Structures are given as C-alpha cells and as structure tokens.
Image: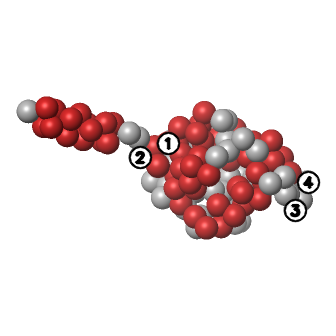
Amino acid sequence: MRAFILLFASTIALFATPSAYEQGKKLYFGKGCNGCHGISAGGSSQYPALANRRKPFLIDKLKGYRAKKGATQLSQIMIPFAIGLSDTQIDALTTFFSEFKESSSHDKTERSSRGDGGS
C-alpha cells in the first residue's frame, strides 16, 4: 500500500510540473520580453521575431548574449536580460519560441508595426 501511495504521489508530481513550453512562456512574459518582441513573439520593425525560429539558432543567440557578446548595438540590449539565464531557462525559452502555438489574431498593434503589407 505504501509503495502504491508513493508511486501515485510521484506520478501526480510529474504531471504537475509545467512543460518546458509552459515554463518558457512564463519566463517570456515574466521577464518582459513581450515588451519588445510582442505578445505573440512576432517581433516588430525594430526587434526580431522569435516565434517558430529554429531552436539551435535561438540557443546560440541567448548563450552568446549571456556571455556578453552582441554583434550590434541593438543586439547588445539583450545582454542584461540574458546574463542571469540558466541553461534550463534558455532551454525553456527556446522551446517556447521554436514550438510557438499561441494565437496572434487578437494582437492588431503588433501586426501594424511590421509595415504596410507590401504595397
């Protein structure tokens, strides 16, 4: 009976742990990344889109910023945000970006900042 209770409790704990995607989403909004990159991580005319980018590319970028490397003045803005990130947090953020599946249909301001649609 005791073994059953331990197995049951550990199973519940396993499923109660948020997925890497959910952890990344929480970090994205908790650290204010959406202030520059947008609610749907779609970027703007000044800041790059992060949604649905390749995970290895994103990991490389975040680890570079964490190591205080920024190729341009604009990219150097990321250094203070990345310095405190752990490998686990970088994995969660990049999972959120690379597997992005949130709806952006409600975010009209983000779309309008990306240009006039090519006209």
- Which quadrant of the structure image shows residue 10? top left
Marks 2 and 3 in Cβ contact (< 8 Å): no
Residue 107 in view, yes or no: no
Q: Amino acid at mark 1?
A: Gln
Which residue position holds label 3? 71
Which residue of the protein is positioned furthest toward the front in this rendering?
Answer: 2
Q: Residues within 10 Å of mark 3 (few under 14, many from 20)?
A: few
The kind of secondary structure element at disc 2 is: loop
Marks 2 and 4 in Cβ contact (< 8 Å): no
Which residue position holds label 1? 23
- Give the CA separation, mark 1 to mark 3: 28 Å
User: Which of the two labelled residues, at mark 4 and mark 1, occupies the earlier sequence position?
Assistant: 1
| Residue under the image location 30 percent in, 41 percent down | 15
Residue 73 is tagged as: 4
Marks 1 and 3 in Cβ contact (< 8 Å): no
Left-right relation of 83 to 33: right
- Give the CA separation, mark 3 to mark 4: 7 Å
- Which quadrant of the structure image shows residue 49? bottom right
Which residue position holds label 2? 19
For the C terminus, the image quarter is bottom right
Along the viewing direction, whichever of 68 and 42 lies nearer the viewer: 68
- Give the CA separation, mark 4 to mark 1: 29 Å
Q: Amino acid at mark 2?
A: Ser
User: Which of the two labelled residues, at mark 2 and mark 3, occupies the earlier sequence position?
Assistant: 2
Q: Amino acid at mark 4?
A: Gln
User: Which of the two labelled residues, at mark 1 and mark 3, occupies the earlier sequence position?
Assistant: 1
- Give the CA separation, mark 2 to mark 1: 6 Å
| Residue under the image location 53 percent in, 38 percent down | 26
Q: How is the image coloured?
A: secondary structure
